[in-house]
Image (cartoon, rainbow, N blue to C red):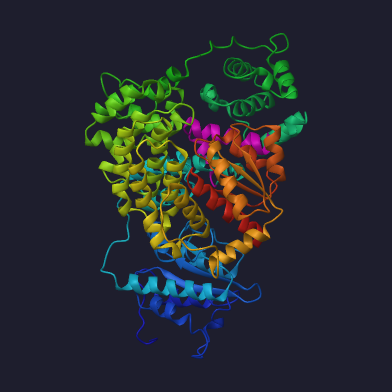
C-alpha cells in the first residue's frame, strides 16, 4: 500500500506525510507516532489509506486523548467552498444521531494545541469540522464506523464538482430569512456558503457577519471581529454602524456611565478606538438611544461642540433626553452651552427618516453607477417597493443593506394591496421579492399579522421549490403569520394541503426541529379544517417516526408530545431506555438545581417549552423572559442563570445584547428557529453542556 500511494490532487505526498506525522504525534493517542506494528492503529489505518489514495474526498482522521478520555473525529476539507457542502454530507451520515450539539459547524482551531495547529497549518482556517459524540465507547465506535462509511461512499461516487452552484442572491435571501426567523445555525450555514462560494465582496461579507453577531447579542465577539477598524473606515451601511455602536455601549460604556464615572467611559471609548465617529452622525436619526449615547460621548470627549449639539438635537426628536445618564447629560450640556463655547447654528432637524435615507441612497456609489437622465424613485413603502421590483428596480440591494424598510409602515396596514401586487409579479420579480422575505418577517413582527401577503410569499416559495434550511424557516414564520390571523376553513385547508405536498422532499431527522415547529403551530392556533390539520401533521410526523432512532432526544420527546396533542397515533418509543436517550435523561436529572433562562418574544412558545421542560427536567428552575429591551428584572434573571437559551426571531439587540452582557454563565445556546421544538432542543443541549462542564 505504501509503495502504491500517490499524491493527492490537492496536496503533495510530502505534505500529506508531514501532516500525518504531526497529527498522530504529541496530543493524539489514537495511533502514537504511526507505529508500524499491525496490531496498533487498527481503527485508524483505513482512514489513512483513503487519504493516501489520492481521492478528492475530505480528510477524515480520529483523535483520542487518553489522559482526558476525549475522542473526536476531524473532517478536513480543502477550501471553504468544499466545507460548505461537506457540512450537509456529515449531517446526512452522522447527525443528529451520533453528534453532540445542534447542527454541524466548522470549528475554530486552537493554535496552541499541537494537533489542531497541525490541521490549521495543513488546510487553513474555516475548513475543518471537529465531530464529538457521547463519551461511552460504543458511541465512539459507531461514530468511527459512520465516518468510514461516509468516506467509502464518497470515494465510490461518480466524479463531480464540489463547488456549490446556488446563486449569490438565493444565498443572501436564505441568510436574511434565517436571521429574521431566528435560525442561528441556518444563518451560519448560509454565511459559510457565501464565504466559500465567492460572488460577494469581503466588505459585504463582513457586514453580514456583524449583522448576525449583533442579532445574537454577541457584542464582545463583534467588537473583536478581525479588521473591524477597516470595516468602519469604509463607511458601512447604517445597520452595521448601529450594531458597532450598540456593542460598544453594552460592553464598554454602560457600566461606567451607570456609576457616573465619565472619565472611565471616555478612557474605554478611546481604548476601543472609537473617538473619530463624526461620519457616523449622518445616520444618527436611525440609531437607538444606546448608539446615540456613544456618539455623544465621543463628541464630548473630543470637545466638539457642534457635533455635541447636533446629537442632542437628534436625541430630543427621536428619544427621551432623560434617558441619558446624568453625568453624560451634564457634560454634554456644558460643552453645548452657547455661553461657554462658541458654536455654529445647529442645522435644521430632519424629522422624516425615510426621506433622509432615500436621499442618502440616491447618492450612494451603487446608485450612481447606473447612469440615467431620470433617477430611480426610491420606494418609501412596501407597495412602492413591489411596484418598483415589477418595473425592474435596480436599487433593491441598497434598500436591504441600509434597512430602509424599518421606517416604512407595517405591511399589515396595506395587506390586501401588497398581496395583489405579489401575485402579479413575473418570474424574475418573484425571485427578487423573495430576497426581501427576511425584511418582511421583521416588519410584520408579532403585533399585527399580514396574512394575505404572507400567503402570497409562501406560494412563491413553494412554486419555485425553495426549500433550503433558511427558506423553510421563512416559510414556517410566514405560515405562523397566516395561522395567527384566524383564516377561514378554505384558506386554512388550501395552505396546509400545499405544505403537506412538500413534506416528502424535506422532512428528515436532520430537519426534525423545523418539521416539529410546523406541527407545534398547528397545536397553538385554531384549526377550522380538522382534516387538513391531521393530513399535514401526519406528513410531518410520520417520516420522523419511521427514523425515530436517528432523532435527537429532545426532538423525540417533542414529537411524542405533539403526536398525542394532535391525535396522530404513531408508534413512538417508550420512555428512555438504553442508549443516547437514557444518557440525556440522566444528564437532565443531573441538571437539577440549575437555573435556566428562556428568552423569546413569543410568550406562548415560552409557556409550552417551560411546561415540557418541567416534565423532562423537573429539578431545573426555569425563568421566562420576553422583554424587548433591558430592564432590572431581566438583568436579575440573566445574572442568576446557569444556562441561557435565546430564540432570536424579531428580537432586538437591546434585549439579546443586554442578556448576554449580564449573564454570568458560559453556557449560552440559541434556538435554530422560533417554535417550541427548536427552543426545547436548544434548552436541553444547554443543560447537558452545563452538566458536562463544556
Q: Is residue 133 visible in the rendered structure shown here?
A: no
Name the quadrant of the C terminus: bottom right
The front one of 362 and 258 is 258
Q: How many marks?
A: 0
Specify the segment rendered in magenta: 226-253
Above or below, 78 relative to 291: below
Residue 111: quadrant of the picture? bottom right
Q: Is residue 453 magenta?
A: no
Note whether 655 is above or below 612 in the view shown.
Answer: above
Rendering quarter of residue 261: top right
Find residue 117 and report its horizontal and vertical position in percent. Answer: 55, 66
Query: Front-most of 401 and 649?
Result: 649
Q: Position of residue 662 (x, y in %)?
A: 68, 41
Residue 663, position as x, y percentages in the image: 68, 44
Q: Work out whether 667 lies above or below 341.
A: below
From the viewer's perspective, tell me whether residue 419 is left or right of residue 320.
Answer: left
Predominant secondary structure, magenta span: helix
Residue 236: in magenta span? yes
* Picture layout, residue 107 above or below residue 42: above
| Residue 518 coordinates in the image, percent (x, y) | 42, 45
- Whether residue 167 sits left or right of residue 510 in the image: it is left
Q: Quadrant of residue 328?
A: top right
Compared across the picture, whether 403 is left or right of 158 comes to: right
Comparing 114 with 41, the one in front is: 41
- Which quarter of the figure is the N terminus placed in? bottom left
Q: Residue at the spot x=24%, y=26% of the render?
A: 391
Amino acid at each position: 500500500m505504501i509503495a502504491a500511494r500517490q499524491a493527492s490532487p490537492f496536496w503533495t505526498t510530502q505534505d500529506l506525510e508531514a501532516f500525518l506525522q504531526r497529527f498522530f504525534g504529541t496530543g493524539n493517542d489514537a495511533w502514537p507516532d504511526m507505529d508500524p506494528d499491525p496490531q496498533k492503529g487498527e481503527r485508524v489505518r483505513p482512514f489513512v489509506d483513503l487519504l493516501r489514495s489520492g481521492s478528492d474526498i475530505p480528510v477524515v482522521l480520529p483523535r483520542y486523548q487518553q489522559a482526558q478520555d476525549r475522542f473526536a473525529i476531524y473532517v478536513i476539507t480543502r477550501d471553504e467552498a468544499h466545507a460548505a457542502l461537506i457540512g450537509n454530507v456529515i449531517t446526512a451520515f452522522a447527525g443528529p444521531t451520533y453528534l453532540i450539539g445542534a447542527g454541524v459547524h466548522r470549528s475554530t482551531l486552537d493554535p496552541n494545541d499541537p494537533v489542531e495547529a497541525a490541521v490549521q497549518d495543513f488546510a487553513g482556517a474555516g475548513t475543518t469540522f471537529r465531530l464529538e459524540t457521547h463519551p461511552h465507547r460504543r458511541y465512539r465506535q459507531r461514530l468511527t464506523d459512520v465516518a468510514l462509511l461516509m468516506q467509502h461512499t464518497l470515494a465510490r461516487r461518480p466524479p463531480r464538482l464540489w463547488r456549490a452552484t446556488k446563486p449569490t442572491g438565493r444565498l443572501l435571501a436564505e441568510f436574511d430569512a434565517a436571521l429574521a426567523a431566528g435560525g442561528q445555525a441556518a444563518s451560519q450555514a448560509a454565511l459559510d456558503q457565501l464565504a466559500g462560494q465567492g460572488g460577494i465582496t469581503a466588505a459585504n461579507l463582513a457586514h453580514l457577519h456583524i449583522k448576525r453577531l449583533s442579532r445574537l447579542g454577541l457584542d464582545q465577539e463583534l467588537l473583536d471581529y478581525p479588521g473591524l477598524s477597516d470595516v468602519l473606515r469604509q463607511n458601512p451601511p447604517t445597520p452595521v454602524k448601529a450594531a458597532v455602536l450598540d456593542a460598544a455601549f453594552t460592553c464598554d460604556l454602560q457600566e461606567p456611565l451607570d456609576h457616573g464615572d465619565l472619565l472611565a467611559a471616555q478612557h474605554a471609548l478611546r481604548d476601543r478606538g472609537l473617538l473619530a465617529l463624526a461620519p457616523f452622525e449622518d445616520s444618527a436619526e436611525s440609531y437607538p438611544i444606546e448608539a446615540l449615547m456613544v456618539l455623544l460621548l465621543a463628541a464630548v470627549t473630543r470637545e466638539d461642540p457642534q457635533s455635541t449639539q447636533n446629537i442632542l438635537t437628534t436625541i430630543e426628536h427621536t428619544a427621551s433626553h432623560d434617558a441619558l445618564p446624568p453625568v453624560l447629560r451634564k457634560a454634554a450640556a456644558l460643552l453645548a452651552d452657547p455661553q461657554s463655547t462658541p458654536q455654529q447654528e445647529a442645522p435644521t432637524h430632519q424629522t422624516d427618516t425615510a426621506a433622509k435615507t432615500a436621499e442618502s441612497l440616491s447618492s450612494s456609489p451603487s446608485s450612481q453607477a447606473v447612469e440615467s437622465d431620470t433617477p430611480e424613485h426610491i420606494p418609501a413603502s412596501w407597495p412602492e417597493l413591489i411596484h418598483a421590483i415589477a418595473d425592474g428596480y435596480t436599487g433593491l440591494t441598497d434598500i436591504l443593506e441600509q434597512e430602509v424598510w424599518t421606517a416604512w409602515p407595517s405591511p399589515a396596514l396595506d395587506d390586501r394591496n401588497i398581496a395583489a401586487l405579489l401575485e402579479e409579479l413575473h418570474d424574475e420579480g418573484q425571485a427578487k421579492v423573495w430576497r426581501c422575505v427576511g425584511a418582511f418577517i421583521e416588519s410584520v413582527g408579532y403585533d399585527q399579522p399580514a396574512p394575505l401577503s404572507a400567503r402570497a410569499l409562501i406560494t412563491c416559495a413553494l412554486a419555485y421549490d425553495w426549500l433550503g434550511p433558511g427558506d423553510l424557516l421563512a416559510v414556517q414564520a410566514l405560515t405562523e403569520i397566516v395561522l395567527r390571523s384566524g383564516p377561514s376553513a378554505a384558506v386554512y385547508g388550501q395552505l396546509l394541503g400545499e405544505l403537506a405536498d412538500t413534506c416528502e422532499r424535506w422532512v428528515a431527522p436532520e430537519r426534525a426541529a423545523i418539521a416539529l415547529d410546523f406541527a407545534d403551530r398547528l397545536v397553538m392556533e385554531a384549526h377550522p379544517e380538522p382534516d387538513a390539520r391531521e393530513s399535514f401533521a401526519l406528513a410531518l410526523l410520520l417520516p420522523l417516526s419511521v427514523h425515530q432512532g436517528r432523532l435527537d432526544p429532545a426532538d423525540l420527546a417533542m414529537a411524542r408530545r405533539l403526536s398525542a396533542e394532535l391525535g396522530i397515533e404513531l408508534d413512538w418509543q417508550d420512555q428512555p431506555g438504553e442508549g443516547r436517550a437514557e444518557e440525556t435523561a440522566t444528564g437532565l436529572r443531573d441538571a437539577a438545581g440549575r437555573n435556566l433562562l428562556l428568552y423569546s418574544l413569543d410568550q406562548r412558545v415560552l409557556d409550552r417549552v417551560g411546561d415540557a421542560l418541567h416534565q423532562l427536567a423537573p429539578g431545573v428552575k426555569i425563568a421566562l423572559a420576553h422583554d424587548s429591551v433591558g430592564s432590572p428584572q431581566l438583568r436579575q434573571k440573566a445574572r442568576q442563570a446557569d444556562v441561557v437559551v435565546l430564540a432570536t426571531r424579531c428580537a432586538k439587540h437591546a434585549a439579546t445584547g443586554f442578556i448576554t452582557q449580564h449573564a454570568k454563565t458560559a453556557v449560552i445556546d440559541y434556538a435554530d428557529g422560533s417554535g417550541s421544538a427548536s427552543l426545547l432542543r436548544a434548552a436541553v443541549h444547554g443543560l447537558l453542556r452545563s452538566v458536562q462542564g463544556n
